[in-house]
């Protein structure tokens, strides 16, 4: 199947498939309070800081989005911002957690990645993900991106936990960074001590894996993925290709209204699937936010 044909299929097929009742039952939507929304802000700044180069991140002098969490203690970073996304690991004493963040990408670059015919669903590497069922399959491009930094990120997290006597790890990311972060959220618990607490907060997260993957995430992770207005990226790749979002969506209607959307790919118009029934009805300018007070990117 050519890339062009698949892209057209995504555009034409998304609406019909997203309306399917197979994966979801309509559940009540609840609106977050201002205090609940404000709890995301430190993690949103960390996700945005993932866009900065490793050198400036380790110096922690990468603009307002870094300075918003001034007590953060960087431990390690890597990537080149091209073939390997930037990443950083450190410890935040205020939140009392190790932070892992992966760089996202601009909307015009993430869109081809989630619609290109070169990707396919594939099994996770058994060395990186020992004991994971072969039923679980993920986007091959996201899998390769996560694998390229997995062992370095693990070593950095182990160092941060040891240096700061921490037993909590929080993983954040936006866009492609959110997809890599979600795979890290499956990977790291397989290699870190039992009893370590994990939390994942993703922004503009595309679909990463199949139904078995979504079910595994629901059963084993504490995930929140925040979607913004008519951003089309969270509705891709299409469900007709076998991709399913895990539960945990919070959808931003506007700067002051965030709605919690129960279940996997909730079809309500107050949630991403219902708000963007086809890619053609989406707005890529919504992908970078704002997510509360934060617009994604390495601010000056």
Image (spheres, rainbow, N blue to C red):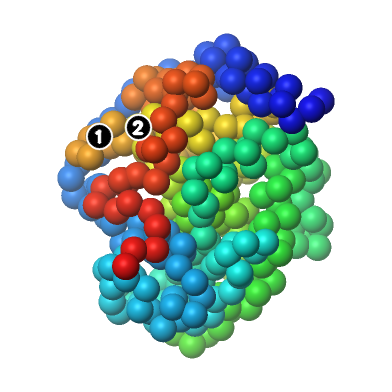
Percent x, y for residue 118?
Answer: 77, 38
At 74% across and 45% down in the image, what residue appears? 140
Q: Is residue 64 left or right of residue 188?
A: left
How crowded pointer 2 is (Cα within 10 Å; few <14, some 14-19, many 20+) is rated as: many
Q: Which mark is residue 18?
A: none
The C terminus lies in quadrant:
bottom left
- Measured along the vertical axis of the image, is residue 63 above or below residue 105? below
Q: Is the residue 81 above or below the residue 224 in the image?
A: below
Give the residue pinned by disc 2. 229
Could you tell me which secondary element the residue under label 2 belongs to? Answer: loop
Q: Residue at x 65, y 74 (%)?
A: 152
Q: CA distance from mark 1 to mark 2?
A: 7 Å
Q: Quadrant of residue 241?
A: top right
Residue 182 seen from this side: no
Q: Residue at x 77, y 59 (%)?
A: 130
Query: Which one is nearer the viewer's eye here, 231 or 226?
Result: 231
Q: Position of residue 182 (x, y in %)?
A: 57, 52
Q: Kindly tell me whether residue 75 is visible in this rendering.
A: yes
Residue under circle 1?
254
- For the image, the number of numbered tags is 2
User: Residue at the bottom extreme?
Assistant: 163
Q: Are marks 1 and 2 in contact (CB under 8 Å)?
A: yes
Residue 211 location, x and y as percent?
66, 32
Crowding at dot 1, Cα within 10 Å, few <14 / some 14-19 / many 20+, comes out as few
Residue 250: x and y, percent?
Answer: 37, 38
């Amino acid at each position: 199947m050519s890339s062009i044909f698949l892209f057209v299929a995504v555009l034409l097929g998304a609406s019909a498939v997203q309306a399917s009742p197979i994966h979801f039952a309509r559940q009540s939507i609840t609106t977050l309070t201002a205090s609940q929304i404000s709890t995301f802000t430190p993690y949103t700044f960390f996700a945005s800081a993932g866009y900065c180069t490793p050198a400036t991140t380790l110096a922690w002098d990468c603009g307002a989005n870094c300075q918003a969490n001034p007590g953060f203690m960087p431990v390690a970073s890597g990537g080149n911002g091209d073939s390997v996304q930037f990443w950083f690991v450190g410890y935040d004493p205020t939140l009392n957690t190790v932070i892992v963040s992966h760089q996202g990408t601009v909307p015009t670059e993430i869109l081809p990645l989630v619609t290109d015919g070169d990707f396919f669903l594939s099994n996770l590497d058994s060395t990186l993900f020992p004991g994971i069922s072969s039923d679980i399959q993920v986007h091959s491009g996201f899998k390769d991106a996560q694998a390229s930094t997995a062992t370095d990120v693990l070593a950095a997290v182990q160092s941060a936990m040891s240096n700061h006597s921490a037993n909590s790890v929080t993983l954040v990311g936006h866009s492609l960074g959110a997809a890599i972060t979600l795979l890290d959220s499956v990977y790291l618990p397989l290699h870190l001590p039992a009893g370590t607490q994990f939390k994942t907060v993703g922004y503009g997260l595309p679909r990463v894996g199949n139904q078995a993957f979504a079910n595994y995430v629901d059963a084993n992770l504490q995930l929140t993925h925040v979607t913004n207005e008519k951003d089309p990226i969270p509705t891709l790749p299409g469900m007709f290709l076998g991709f399913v979002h895990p539960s945990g969506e919070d959808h931003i209607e506007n700067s002051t209204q965030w709605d919690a959307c129960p279940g996997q790919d909730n079809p309500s118009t107050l949630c991403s699937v219902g708000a963007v029934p086809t890619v053609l009805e989406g707005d890529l300018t919504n992908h970078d936010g704002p997510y509360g007070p934060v617009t994604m990117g390495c601010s000056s």
